[in-house]
Image (cartoon, rainbow, N blue to C red):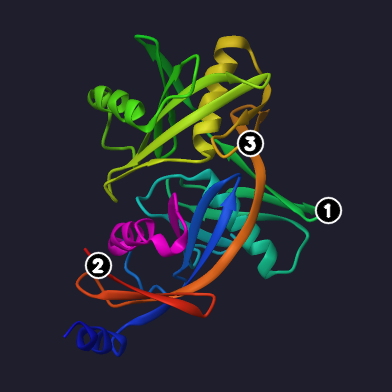
Amino acid sequence: MEREKRSACSGMTNGFTLHKFDAGGNPTVLVDNVSGGIHESDYPEVARNILNNKGLGGVDQVGFIEKPLREGPDGRMVMMGGELCINALRCYGGFLASERQLKAGNFSIETSGVDAPIRVTVRSEEGITKSKVQLDCVPIVSIADDVHTVDLPGIRHHIVFTPKPLSKVELRRRLANMACHHHLEFEAIGMIAISPFNGSFLISPLVHVPATRTSIMETSCGSGSLAAYLVLANSVGMTQTKLWQPSGECLEVEEVGRHTYSVEGSVFPIFTGSFLFEGSTGYYELVIDGSAKVWVGME
C-alpha cells in the first residue's frame, strides 16, 4: 500500500532543485522555486521536512529562490519563516556568482524581512569564496536585567555575556524566560551568548522561527553576529571585529557607513539535489547527486 501511495504521488508531483551550501559552517539549503510551483504558505512545511531529513547531513535553515518582484534586482530569496537571514543571503550570492561563472561580483537581492534589495558582494581567491552582505538598517539596541535586545529587520536577538558558551538547553530556557518580550512583528527570535575566545569573542546562537516551529542551535549566525557586534560596539566601542562561530569559522562584521553594516565570511557549495512535492497532504522524494532516494511523509 505504501508503495502504491508513492507511485500515485510520483505521477502528480512537481520536481524542484535544492542546493546545499556551507556559510561559515552554517549548513543552508536553497530551494529553486522560480517557477512558483510551491506556494509560499507551504514554505514552513517543506522547510521543516528538509530540516528533519537526515539524508541531507544536517541543515540549519532553508530559503526559497523566487522570481524578483521588480525589475533591477539580480534575484529574490525568501526564508522559510519570512525572516531575514544573512548567511542564506551570502549563500545565494555565491550561487549567483557560480551560475554566472564569475570569480567576483556584486548582486542586488530582494529578500524576506526587508523592503529594499540588499547588496551581496562575492569574491574568490585561491579557491576560497568570500561572500559579504551589506545591510542598511537602523537597529534598536536596549538592555534590561543584563539582557541586551537587538531589533533588526525581521528578527530580534536577545544577548547575554557569559564566561563560557551556553548549551542549547540553557539557551532555550533563557529564551523561554524572554517570551514576554517577543512581538508578532518579528519572524524569528534569537538567544545568543557572547563569551571571550581566542583574543576575540565567540557567539552561541539559538534561533527560533515560529512559522516552522523550530529552534535551531546554529553552527554560525550572520544576523546574530551583527547583533553581537552592535552590543559590543555599544559596550566597548568596537568598530570592526571577527566573531568566532560554533563551527570554528569567523564572520567579520563592520560598520561601513552610517546605519550601514557588512557581514562577511566564507561560503561554498556542498551538493545539488532534487525533490518531488505534491502538497501539504503528500510526499516528497529526495534525490541527492542523482541517487540516494529517500521518501518522507509530509506532516
Q: Disc 1 marks which amino acid?
A: Glu
Q: Which residue is mark 1?
A: 126
Report the side of 247 relative to 295 (left or right): right
Specify which label sits upstream in the sequence, 3 or 2.
3
What's the magenta region? Answer: 41-64
Q: Which residue is mark 2?
A: 298
- The image quadrant of residue 207 is top left
Residue 223 place in picture, x, y as percent:
51, 36
Vertical comparison of 295 with 50: above or below: below
Residue at image location 37% in from the left, 50% down from the top: 82
Q: Which residue is mark 3?
A: 251
Vertical comparison of 277 with 244: above or below: below
Residue 60 highlighted magenta (yes or no): yes
Disc 1 element? loop
Residue 6 place in picture, x, y as percent:
26, 83
Report the side of 55 relative to 252 (left or right): left
Specify which label sits upstream in the sequence, 1 or 2.
1
Cβ atoms at labels 1 and 2 below 8 Å apart: no
Q: Disc 2 marks which amino acid?
A: Met
Residue 130 place in picture, x, y as percent:
71, 48
Residue 57 place in picture, x, y as percent:
47, 58
Vertical comparison of 100 with 184: above or below: below
Report the side of 164 relative to 169 (left or right): right
Residue at image location 55% in from the left, 31% down from the top: 226
Depth order, front residue of 293/60: 293
